[in-house]
């Protein structure tokens, strides 16, 4: 008789989701889905608001990556205004975005995923959390906390708040950088370098232990999308998008924010509130692709900073072409962080970084605007339409989680087939299926299930609805 396994909620994610695994009469996995079970509605309730309010409003979508929404939204508003922001403002925004990337990646790697990596996938769930990491590997636990604090403090210094800073606005930023704040950030960089190097060393020492997971964690050929500069180095705030195929060949290049809606479509599925993005010429689901750290490193020819370039060269040795295994999102995330720290230091050496001209001003010069940036989890696109008074009449957001949605679902299915046999499962096997989703670090809402009392109940039902097996943890 057919059966269904439900993992609800999926733990150590930023938001609320569940996994259902469907078994056939022989107890073999027939299908599996990752469900996003919450509704936000930001696109709808932004209608009627003045366009210049959008950056601050859109930042409230997320408490972990508000800066990416601030920047993508501001860029869409600047498209409506038809202005180019001052160079110093662009550099300051870039630094803010990189600081957010560092703190967000630190949260993902150390708080959410390192319990699996450093303690083991089969460790008791009661200790498989950040506290367990700090107890077993105190130097790495401290490094993770410090790297998150590094990024958050830079955000606070620049924007006066760690979460939802109002500093980024349509036209640039509200105020220039002060010399004292520049010097304080520079003083923090040596410790940040030491901590990220410690994390990279630790990852390389343990990566070989996870060959089974590497093979089945969403490891399949796909397209990849990400921002790059004209010199083909990685970019987070400006540049244009490149789409490559599973062999590394360029499928489409120079995709600007304005061009994005012409090439990227969105599909819906009945089991999730998150949309599924795809490359229109190939259709859905054939045109599904991946974004985020793995995609960025697969696409870029260089990182643009010396230490990160050396790590990128090592990363590229993992495969003849693009690295397909989503387990390597963890490694790519650490390289991103190293790049971010190096790039922040470079930006602070810009002789114009203290310039006071940091804002361009204008009204409505176009009735439609688009903006894009790289969030920690991948490409983020904002698209607005306004009336003659500058009030929003329509908005659409394409978020990284939606662009990775099909890959996450395929990965969950692959892992479920590998770890569930004859209808039987253990807690460690289910944790591995959850861990597939954690490699992508999906951002489902502002809430984060890092540890604590969030319960997990997995129930195996027979076709008649009777309970065949049940596992509960954290209750």
Image: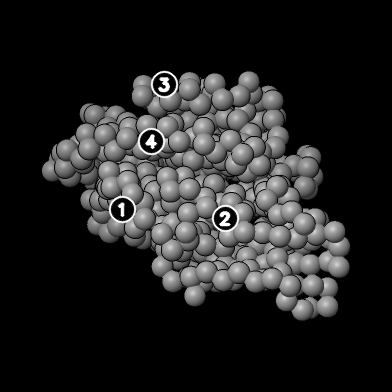
Mark 2 vs 1, N-terminal side: 1
In the rendered image, residue 408, in percent from the top left (x then y), is placed at 64, 50
Quadrant of image for the N terminus: bottom right
Mark 4 to mark 2 CA distance (whole Å): 22 Å
Q: Are marks 2 and 1 in contact (CB under 8 Å)?
A: no
Please give the residue where the numbered disc 3 appears in the rendered image. Answer: 310
Q: 10 Å neighbourhood of mark 3: few (<14), some, or many (≥20)?
A: few
Residue mark closest to the camera, 1 vs 4: 1
* Secondary structure state at the residue bearing disc 3: helix
Q: Determine the CA span between mark 2 and mark 3.
A: 35 Å
Q: Between 323 and 11, which is closer to the camera in this rendering?
A: 11
| Relative vertical location of residue 298 with respect to residue 152 in this rendering, above or below | above
Q: Quadrant of residue 395?
A: bottom right
Labelled disc at residue 202: 4
Q: Residue 369 in the image: state x and y as whole percent.
A: 55, 51
Bin the neighbour count of mark 1 within 10 Å (Cα to Cα): few under 14, some 14-19, many 20 and up: few
Badge number at residue 428: 2
């Amino acid at each position: 008789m057919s059966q269904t396994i439900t993992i609800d909620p999926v733990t150590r994610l930023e938001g609320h989701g569940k996994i259902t695994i469907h078994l056939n009469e022989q107890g073999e996995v027939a299908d599996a889905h990752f469900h996003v079970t919450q509704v936000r509605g930001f696109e709808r309730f932004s209608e009627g608001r003045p366009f210049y309010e959008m950056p601050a409003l859109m930042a409230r979508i997320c408490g972990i990556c508000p800066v990416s929404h601030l920047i993508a939204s501001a860029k869409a508003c600047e498209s409506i205004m038809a202005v180019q922001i001052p160079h110093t403002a662009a550099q300051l925004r870039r630094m803010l975005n990189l600081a957010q990337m560092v703190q967000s990646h630190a949260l993902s790697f150390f708080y959410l995923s390192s319990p699996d990596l450093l303690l083991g996938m089969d460790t008791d769930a009661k200790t498989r959390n950040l506290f367990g990491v700090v107890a077993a590997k105190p130097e790495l636990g401290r490094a993770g906390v410090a790297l998150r604090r590094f990024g958050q403090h830079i955000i606070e210094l620049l924007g006066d708040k760690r979460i939802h800073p109002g500093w980024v606005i349509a036209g640039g930023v509200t105020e220039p950088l002060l010399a004292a704040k520049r010097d304080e950030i520079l003083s923090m960089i040596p410790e940040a370098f030491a901590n990220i190097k410690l994390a990279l060393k630790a990852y390389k020492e343990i990566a070989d232990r996870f060959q089974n997971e590497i093979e089945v964690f969403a490891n399949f050929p796909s397209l990849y999308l990400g921002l790059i500069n004209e010199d083909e180095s990685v970019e987070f705030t400006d540049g244009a998008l490149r789409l490559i195929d599973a062999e590394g060949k360029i499928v489409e290049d120079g995709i600007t924010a304005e061009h994005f809606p012409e090439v990227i479509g969105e599909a819906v599925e009945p089991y999730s509130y998150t949309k599924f993005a795809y490359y229109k010429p190939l259709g859905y689901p054939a045109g599904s692709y991946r974004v985020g750290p793995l995609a960025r490193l697969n696409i870029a020819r260089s990182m643009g900073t010396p230490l990160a370039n050396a790590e990128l060269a090592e990363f590229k040795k993992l495969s003849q072409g693009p690295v397909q295994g989503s387990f390597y999102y963890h490694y790519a995330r650490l390289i991103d962080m190293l790049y971010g720290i190096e790039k922040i230091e470079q930006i602070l050496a810009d002789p114009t970084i203290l310039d006071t001209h940091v804002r361009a001003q204008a009204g409505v010069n176009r009735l439609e605007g688009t903006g894009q940036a790289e969030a920690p989890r991948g490409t983020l696109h904002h698209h607005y339409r306004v009336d003659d008074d500058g009030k929003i009449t329509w908005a659409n957001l394409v978020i990284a989680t939606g662009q990775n949605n099909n890959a996450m679902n395929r990965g969950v299915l692959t892992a479920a087939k590998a770890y569930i046999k004859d209808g039987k499962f253990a807690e460690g096997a289910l944790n591995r299926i959850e861990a597939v989703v954690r490699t992508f670090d999906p951002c489902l809402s502002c809430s984060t299930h890092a540890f604590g009392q969030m319960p997990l109940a997995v129930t195996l039902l027979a076709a008649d609805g009777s309970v065949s097996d049940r596992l509960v943890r954290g209750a």
